[in-house]
Image (cartoon, helix red, strand yellow):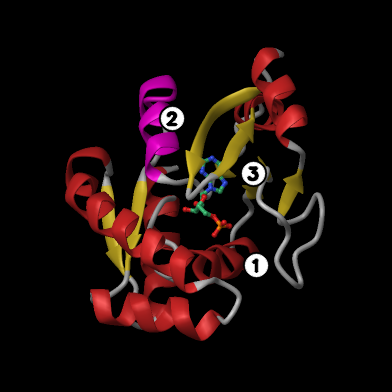
Amino acid sequence: MSGPSGSGKTSIIRKLLERLDILFSVSATTRPPRPGETQGVDYYFVTTEEFEEMITRDALLEWAIYSGNHYGTPSDPIETETAAGRDVLLDIEIKGARQVRALRPDALMIFVTPPSNEVLEQRLRSRGDTSSQDIASRLMIAESQLKEAPSLFDHIVVNEVLEHAVDEVANLIIDSR
Ligand code: 5GP
């Protein structure tokens, strides 16, 4: 699953994990933790050296630099779970999604969008944990992502009302099984 930061993707994912038997892929990142985030649950927070070591070991299914930080998906849980026939949910940005599309043609690719740019900006500002500079950078990324989304993703889900978006994504996952 991909979507601009502020699209509400994280809230959708939280609800999906309560509802469906699906494993969340915990990514590695060099971004510092935000208040309330837990090591090993939200992310594996690592140093740049540790991240580079993971790349060298070929331990990442995909990785990308987003807004100045490295983010990557550890391969092992994906291989193990999907080999056992279970679903894994990835929350990744678009460069990573492109890599997953190429590496795992069986992946169900969903893009979540906010109803408008104005709503996106409001959501980012109301989070209160992201600097103005970071908000501006994330808004620019969102704009370019929206242009590419239709050619890369199987489905685009507009997150206007959270519960409706959760229902829609849950149904897409169930239907694809
Ligand atoms: P945030 O810093 O807001 O948690 O995440 C920033 C962006 O990085 C989000 O779009 C999120 O989907 C993406 N992201 C998180 N984990 C990964 C990952 O493992 N790989 C890639 N390519 N992107 C990720």
Residue 42: x and y in percent read 71, 56
* Magenta residue span: 94-105
Q: Nearer the viewer, mark 1 or mark 3?
A: 3
Checking the image for residue 105, the label placed there is none
Res 152 → quadrant: top left
- Mark 3 secondary-structure assignment: loop
- Horizontally, residue 175 falls left or right of residue 9, namely left
Q: Does the CB distance between marks 2 and 3 fall below 8 Å?
A: no
Q: Which amino acid, by three-letter code, is at mark 3?
A: Ser
Mark 1 or mark 2: which comes first in sequence? 1
Q: Which residue is mark 1?
A: 18
Q: Residue beneath label 2, please?
A: 100
Are there few (<14), some (14-19), or many (20+) residues within 10 Å of tag 2?
A: many
| Kind of residue sitting beneath label 2 | Val
Dividing the image into 4 quarters, which one contains the C terminus? Answer: top left
Image point 50% across, 68% down: which residue? 12
Q: Residue at x 68, y 14 (%)?
A: 56
User: Would you identify the image quadrant in which residue 151 lies?
Assistant: top left
Is 56 or 87 nearer to us in this picture?
56
**Position above or below: 158 against 174:** below
C-alpha gap between disc 1 and disc 2: 24 Å
Is 108 left or right of 117, judged from the image as shown? Answer: right
By secondary structure, the bulk of the magenta-drawn segment is best described as helix
Question: In the displayed structure, would residue 72 be above or below residue 44?
Answer: above
Q: Are marks 1 and 2 in contact (CB under 8 Å)?
A: no
Tell me what residue is drawn at x 71 percent, y 55 percent: 32
Closer to the eye: label 1 or 2:
2
Residue tagged by mark 3?
25
Count of residue discs: 3
Residue 142 locus on image (x, y percent): 31, 58
